[in-house]
Image (spheres, rainbow, N blue to C red):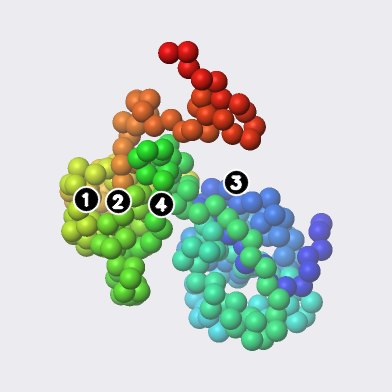
Amino acid sequence: MKTLEPKVYIVGAGPGDPELITVKGSNILKNADLVLYTDSLVNDELIATAKPEAEVLQSSGMDLEQQVELMCAAVRAGRSVARVHTGDPAMYGAILEQMVLLKQQGVQYEIIPGVSSVFASAAALGAELTVPELTQTVILTRAEGRTPVPEREKLRDLASHHCTVALFLSATLAKKVVVEFLAAGWSEDTPVAVVQRATWPDQKIVRTTLANLAADLRAAGITMHAMILAGWALDPDLVNRDAHRSKLYDKSFTHGYRKGVKSCE
């Protein structure tokens, strides 16, 4: 058993599959003295790998100050803390507010990245989000609901780039999403894919179009824990075409590791 330094480890647990935590994250979870986890989103099978003598607590019933107080008290007592978040902590993980209070208290912390639900969803769909000559940009955002977004980050403005867009926390706002994308000039037949609870045993996938997004989500009963991916990179027919090869493996393309061969034609 590895002895961890007494500090707070903010660990990304991945999207749901307990095997999709990083090796480093897994080692911290298995050796931490206090495990505080997002119980509504993190797989219990993963939390069960904590050492038997660890104190394991759920965070859903605590406010921010209660969580930070527990973590600070543990570290000051010489104990290590695994603060376990779903996906990758950097994406809608509400970790900055924790770090601010931990720093004010003089308590050390370290962030351990994890597999984000956006990439788990792309994998479930068998999709590449950056397709050569189709789109080379992915925008990660959310629709504006009760929590506002900055004025320059309105969905309509972001969608005007016509690249792949990944929407977190937006399943209940599907009608609004459609309105904003259409206003940005997207066609109604633009491919959209929705993955609910990516990598969990009850994972659900809906493939649709922009015009049918709201109706299809309603029919599938999807209102939460879903990733919406939109754009022509989500066209399932792309795998039937050989039209978007990269330069990296093009035999005529020269780079630092291989000299290209010119065609004789």
The residue at which mark 2 appears reads as 162
| Residue 42 shows in this picture | no
Q: Earlier in the sequence, mark 4 or mark 2?
A: 4
Q: Nearer the viewer, residue 262 or 39?
A: 262
Residue 252, compared with residue 156, is above or below; it is above
Q: Position of residue 186 (x, y in %)?
A: 21, 50
Question: Which amino acid type is marked by label 3?
Answer: Glu
Q: Secondary structure at mark 4?
A: strand
Which residue occupies 31% across, 54% down?
161
Q: Secondary structure at mark 1?
A: loop
Q: Point out the image quarter for the C terminus.
A: top left
Question: Which residue in the rendered view is the most extreme toward the top?
Answer: 264
Question: How far, Cα to Cα, is label 3 from label 2?
Answer: 34 Å
Front tag of 3 and 2:
2
The residue at which mark 1 appears reads as 186
Q: Position of residue 129 (x, y in %)?
A: 41, 44
Which residue occupies 71% across, 60% down?
28
Q: Are marks 3 and 2 in contact (CB under 8 Å)?
A: no
Question: How far, Cα to Cα, is label 4 from label 2?
Answer: 10 Å
Q: Earlier in the sequence, mark 4 or mark 1?
A: 4
Q: Are marks 4 and 2 in contact (CB under 8 Å)?
A: no
Q: Position of residue 185 (x, y in %)?
A: 20, 53
Q: Are marks 1 and 2 in contact (CB under 8 Å)?
A: yes
Which residue occupies 34% across, 25% down?
240
Front tag of 4 and 3:
4
The residue at which mark 4 appears reads as 138
Question: Which amino acid type is marked by label 4?
Answer: Val
